[in-house]
Amino acid sequence: MYQVRKLLIRIGIKRDDFCVSFSLYDVPDIEHFVAREKELERIHRELKGDGTRRIVVLHGLGGVGKTQLSIEYAKRHKDNYSAIFWLNIKDENSLKQSFARIGRQILREHPESRLSTAHMTGNLDDLVDAVKAWLSLSNNTRWLMIYDNYDNPKLPNNTDPSAVDIRKYLPESYQGHIIITSRLSQIGMGHTIQIKKLADIHDSLDILSNASGREGLQNGKNRLP
């Protein structure tokens, strides 16, 4: 597998050859997004660059909206990226399964990719390496990876054996954009943005209205029981 990875990184391919259709399949999404414009602007500002690696960590309490914020960013800026991938990083197995799903996405549009070799073996570790190598190809710089739910990171003060070291699952080349969502602020990489609870009651009611499918909560026309 090491030789395959080296070969992938050496191959020169045009940027258009890395395009993968934008998909939110299996991603927790809501139809209407409310507020968070300042946070969206800051994410965009921090991720802008010359193609070298940019990392943003969104941290805050559970349920505060970190996942939806990262998804909304992806939806708004999808035309700026050749590929956008979402990964569930709550534990190592979920993360590897996410890489397997990404591998299938890539192969559907690029069947000639060397990923097919790893896909045929069915070995998850090989698939992780193959996807990382594909993302590390010299002209493949316009991708966005969203690592969601990184709430159990492998840190010096964390003795949990199931803790995940995200660095093992980042592409090796210093390129591309990465968003990490976590309840913790001590991830130790990238630009950190704290996501707080919505202070404006009207924004909160809009979100509740969207989630429940019931309009008019703000003016009392459709009160909750």
Image (cartoon, helix red, strand yellow):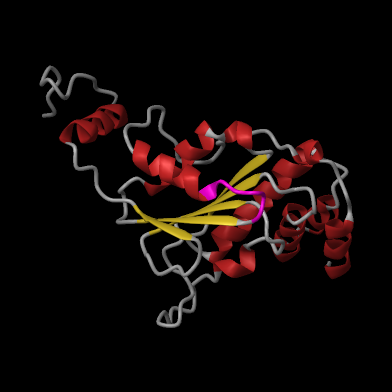
The N terminus, quarter of image: bottom right
Q: Position of residue 69 (x, y in %)?
A: 41, 42
Relative side of 145 to 58, left or right? right
Q: Position of residue 135 (x, y in %)?
A: 72, 53
Q: Residue at point 19% right, 42% down?
A: 199
Q: Is residue 51 magenta?
A: yes
The answer, for residue 23, to whether it is visible in the render is no
Read off the magenta span.
Answer: 47-52
Q: Residue at point 40% right, 82% down?
A: 157
Q: Position of residue 6 (x, y in %)?
A: 86, 64
Q: What kind of secondary structure does the magenta stretch mostly adopt? A: loop
Q: Position of residue 51 (x, y in %)?
A: 67, 50
154 up-or-down from 179: above or below: below
88 or 11, which lies in front?
Answer: 11
Q: Is residue 22 magenta?
A: no
Point out the residue furthest to the top here.
221
